Image: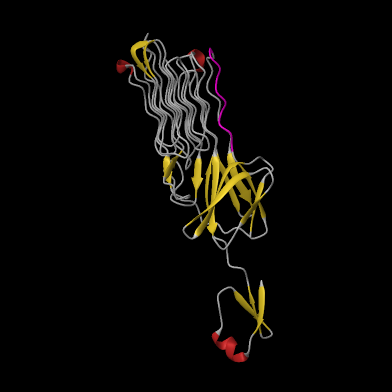
Amino acid sequence: MSVTKLSVSKLSTGLQKQSSFYGGYRVDAPAAITAFYLVIAGGGSGGSTGGGGAGGLRANITGSGGGGAAESSWQPTAGVAYNISVGAGGPQLANGSQAVGNNGSNSYLTGSGIYVVSTGGGGGGGFSGNRNAANGGCGGGGGWDLGTKGTGTANQGFDGATCLDNSAGPYTSAGGGGTGLAGIADTPASGRSGAGGSGSLNNIDGNNYYWGGGGGGGAQNGSPNIGGNGGIGGGGGGAAAFSTPTGGTGGGTAKNSGANGGTTGTGGAGGANTGGGGGGMAVTVGPSGAGGSGIIILSIPTANSATFSAGVTQTSATVGSRKVYTITAAGTTDTVTFS
């Protein structure tokens, strides 16, 4: 803060915004910091059949996931510490598991005047009594034998799809939801499992990436049997196995693409730091794909800076008139402070 003595003539012509006058002195307050944020949670892992849902997405630039509008503008206070945490993706399931996939962990940006919590993606549907998928930021895809979809969280992400197959083979399953579109159902007659829903385009870092693609469903035992593709934005491809298998392709156009599904039962992992859902395994033949970890991206004017606590992993870059901080790891006690 600067203090300048002014003459009476200067007082009549030197009025500025964010200035106050005390006894012939002008006191200039610091300019407000206008910050943009993108907060994505960890994606859900693929189940023993269905694809995992992507982590929820909240942003105050472009728009939030699930078709939500951009959130309110944010002006953080200089010198105040804000809490940040980047959620992990849901861990993969082991070969032979019949379980629902594991949900991803939440990511958050909280403190004075702000409370942004993005919800971890829902795990993909399992097998037999575990066929129904989990709810989350984006819902998981239903498992083989008519497993129901998981539901997404409003203004964060979309639902997965419900499985349509209850045949004796090929066995197919449904795709997990993405932040931009719902998961896609399987087409049992063609032996194809459902694709993960697409992620959302958000250009906060100047790279035109999609974020939060859903995981593809897994397939097994047919000629052909085809794993679902991962959704654009880091979704993992669904696995296939036996007879004439074709693994699903991982979703790209992302900070890190989702991995392809294998042809011996291994689901593709969601892309790291995209919140992508993991691909389903080939009906208990696995392992399934782990969910992709989340991310937080902050954008502030180049005249300002951000300082992070010791546990944060981040990089910074100048994009036009903005300074962009990409935070790929932060624990539950970590903070950011602006100046």
Whether the magenta-drawn stretch holds residue 92 is answered as: yes
Check the image and report above or below for 98 versus 216.
above
Question: What range is drawn magenta here?
Answer: 87-96
Is 228 positioned to the left or the right of 7 in the image?
left
Whether the magenta-drawn stretch holds residue 76 is answered as: no
Q: In which quarter of the image is residue 229?
A: top left
Is 177 positioned to the left or the right of 74 in the image?
left
Kindly give the residue lying farthest to the left in the view shown.
Answer: 189
- Report x, y in % for residue 147: 44, 20
Quarter of the image containing the N terminus?
Answer: bottom right
- Report x, y in % for residue 224: 33, 14
Say which residue appears at 69% left-offset and 45% top-offset: 310
- Report x, y in % for residue 295: 54, 41
Main SS, magenta residues: loop
Quarter of the image containing the C terminus?
Answer: bottom right
Kindly give the residue lying farthest to the bottom in the view shown.
Answer: 9
Number of numbered discs present?
0
Tell me if I can see residue 120 in this picture: no
